[in-house]
Amino acid sequence: MPSPEAICQQIRAALEHAPRINLHCYPIHLHGEDGIVTVDGDAEHIVAKKLALERAAAIPGVDGLVDRLRVIPTRPMGDGAIRDHVRDALLQEPAFATFAITIRAQGQVAPVRPGSGTPCGSIEVAVADGVVTLNGQVPSLSHKRLAGVLAWWVPGSRDVINGLAVEPPQEDTTDEITDAVRLVLDKDPFVRADQIHVRTRDRVVTLEGLVPNTTIREMAAYDAWYVFGVDRVANELQVEA
């Protein structure tokens, strides 16, 4: 069994050679104990965060990860503003129209909207140091994933801890991940979802099709990266001539 120091050295070597991870500008700190490695620091974006966790988990001797990586926000925002944006996004999303929405701030829970009708569900939003935490109960994995992406779409979000429970429990499958990515692309007003083909294998999502420019190409890929359960995105989208 390699020592914690040796495991961390192997992880650092893997991260130094990983695409889209810049350790010189955005250092990542590692600490290992009893096979559990804590990954801490500021990641440049969601891609760097997920790739770092994937590379760390693949190192022999790593039995588990403690994820403390935070993404540099695209726009600095206070916790209250982030919470308000997430709340409003949930309230405006038709898929959550019948869900009870509450917010937690300073240890107090405040109801925003009671649940009414079917499907039923509840979502509680809390924000601390730019990290959004979602708790509650939803009827499907698609609802859980959509709520997480809506939280990630808020420019000030540094991380999303998606603690939403799915009741009744639902088995996760490749088709479920593919459907969730398609749903998210369809919700993005800047992306033409009908131009993009999505396929998934072993939690790796591949995007294919034609998009109008490189900005949309990157936005579509980020949408897929934000989906809970996606470990990697292969962006094979082509830009129209």
Image (spheres, rainbow, N blue to C red):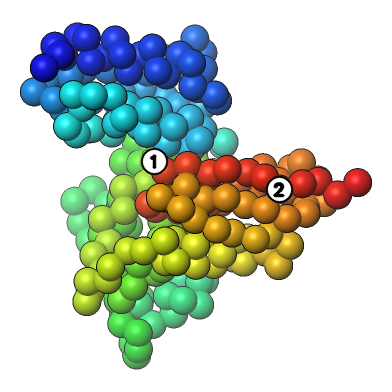
Q: Nearer the viewer, residue 100 or 23?
A: 23
Q: Are marks 2 and 1 in contact (CB under 8 Å)?
A: no
Image point (20%, 56%), residue name: 108
Mark 1 nearby-residue class (10 Å; few <14, some 14–19, many ≥20): many
Position of 135 relative to 79 (above/below): below
Position of 48 relative to 179 (above/below): above
Position of 186 relative to 42 (above/below): below
Residue 237 — which label? Answer: 2
Image point (31%, 48%), residue name: 161
Q: Tell me the mark number nearer the camera, choosing from 2 and 1.
A: 2
Mark 2 nearby-residue class (10 Å; few <14, some 14–19, many ≥20): many
Q: Nearer the viewer, residue 12 or 113?
A: 12
Image point (26%, 55%), residue name: 163
Identity of the residue furthest to the left in this view: 34
From mark 2 to mark 1, how far is it between C-alphas? 26 Å
Q: Which of 103 and 226 is in front in this view?
A: 226
Q: Where is residue 122 in the image (x, y as percent from the top left)?
A: 28, 72
Identity of the residue furthest to the right in this view: 241
Residue 159 — which label? Answer: 1
Give the amino acid at mark 2.
Leu
Q: Where is residue 51 in the image (x, y as percent from the top left)?
A: 44, 32
Q: What element carries label 2?
A: strand
Q: Position of residue 48 (x, y in %)?
A: 48, 30
Quadrant in the rendering for residue 131: top left
Circle nearer the N terminus (2, 1)? 1
Whether residue 197 sits left or right of residue 140 in the image: it is right
The answer to whether any part of residue 189 appears in the image is no
Give the amino acid at mark 1.
Asp
